[in-house]
Amino acid sequence: MAELRAYAMLLGGQWRSVTSYRASFAVEMITNIGGTALDVLAVLVIFQATTNVAGFSLPEGVLIVSLSSCAFALADFAVGNIDRLKTYVRTGTMDAVLVRPLSAFGQLILMDLPLRKALRLPFGMAVLAVALRINHVEWTPARVVLLVVTPLAGAVFFASIFVLSASLAFWWVDSGEVGSAFTYGGRDFTAYPTPVYSGWFRVVFAYGLGFGFVAYQPALALLGRADPLGMPAWAGFASPLVALLAAGLAAAVWRTGIRHYRSTGS
Amino acid sequence: MDGLDARVPQISPRRPFRDWFTTFGALAWSGFRRYATYRQATIAGSFTNIVFGFLRCYVLLAVAAGAVGGTPAGYRPDQLATFVWVGQGLLTVVSLWGWTELSDRIRTGEVTADLLRPIHPVIGYLAPDLGRALHGMVFRFVPPLVAGLVCFDLYRPGRWFTVPLFGVSVLLAVVGSMGVRFLVNATAYWLHDARGPIMLWTLAAGVLAGLYFPLRFLPEPLAVTLWVATPFPGLMQSPLDVLVERDPVPLQFALVALQAAWAAALLGLCALVQRRAERRLVAQGG
């Protein structure tokens, strides 16, 4: 109970700090929606420059990007700031986090919860609502459940990727932008239908790392479309399983990393 | 004490230009050396550039495969692949993101030290930035290009002057990018905190410079307006279009001329803003 109160106070501190610079916060919030809007806009421009992208039409493309946006926005809001871990490790702030009687993970997340990113998720959901209107979906109970579960499972998956790539800093302090290749790179990968990519790159990202299950396979299941790449129909319902696997791996790597951590000694 | 200021007496009055070049060269070299010390960051950054190269290249190739005639907005597939991979290499050279040095120095008050130097502040930031860009050209431009050459079919320029012209175009893009970054950072003279303008710049730079998709994918009137009325296409889209020979020869040269005009205008604007800012500067932090 005392622990919960400590977390609540960390969050309250965040809230007070953003409300004391209101104009700056408003600008940041609007710019953040702009960021998500641009991702969607880029997909629109790409699709209207051609008749179809790897056999997918514009409405289908919008459905895929909106599922990906919702999942990423939720994950980025909740744990996206974990990628600042490398700064904490380098500057030695991590030591202060570890001596407090609270979980390191919880503190790192609540110390800097990006409230400015809060409106990204509603934007993503609005695009998803539009996507569901312009696509023809034959609703069944299974598909309704799938629609609710997909963004949540995707968010858990992206959150695991965030934690995994941040954990890299425990072993390689100057890992710099390597993590972005998988977090933001993963977001870009999931924004388009998987058949767009090819060769070993597709195999690694879609199936090896599991990004194909965030938006593409569930979108196929929602639309009732067969996968041109030959994955069975149930693959669309596999995203929670993939997300749980990723979360388990992320938790294990995070714990090992915390135990491996030696202060930079500065 | 009249007439005593921080200017260094001219050492060799008969050869003023030589002094100037020596100073400029030393500053540029310092910029090069500074970035040469971040070796692990260079490797990490190149890896990320290459992953994004794959992502963007496959998307644009899929667009080409689905487009009527296979040439969306007049680009052939090998031109699009070159556009992506060279673009990934140029990203760090023209430094589209994340430069807050000037605004940080304004906020902390350290910028007063820049004003004491016997060199104009705009030049004092431009020279190290060119050194940084040279480092980028050697260490960040090459890895994505090699990855692109190994994994994709890239376009070989057919006109003999294309590669030198591309070099000029990149130089002008770096100068233009420095100009915009200087202006965005200089808002801190008035706002104390340039975070909002810098975020807007980051957002605008990516999409309006042609990083996310070639600007020719947009309706033509919009693309032309962007080109003429904003400096952004000159930061990336123009050098890339020059390299892949998207346009006939006169237009190819006109793109570079437009970049030169924008670079000159931006530097002039930087000097003007700097002069106005110095009048109202109150050093922060004492």
Image (spheres, coloured by chain):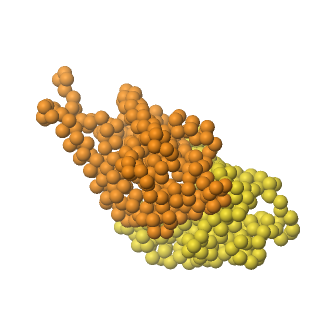
Seen at 77% across and 53% down, the residue is: A130
Q: Colour of chain B?
A: orange
Check the rendered structure and report the hue given to chain A.
yellow
- The x and y percentages for residue B241 are 49, 48
Which residue appears at 66% of the width and 75% of the height? A242
Residue B197 in percent (x, y) is at 51, 41
Position of B69 with respect to B18 (left or right) is right
Q: In which quarter of the image is residue B46?
A: bottom left
- Residue drawn at x 59%, y 70% is A198
Residue A115 visible to an observer of this rendering: no
Residue in the image at 79% along x and 66% along y: A222
Q: State the count of labels.
A: 0
- Please tell me which residue lies in front, A202 or B250: B250
Q: Where is residue B250 in the image (x, y as percent from the top left)?
A: 46, 40
Residue B200 shows up from this direction: yes
Q: Nearer the viewer, residue B170 or B113?
A: B170
Task: Say which of A123 and A103 sits in front.
Answer: A123
Position of the C terminus of chain B, as image quadrant, is top left
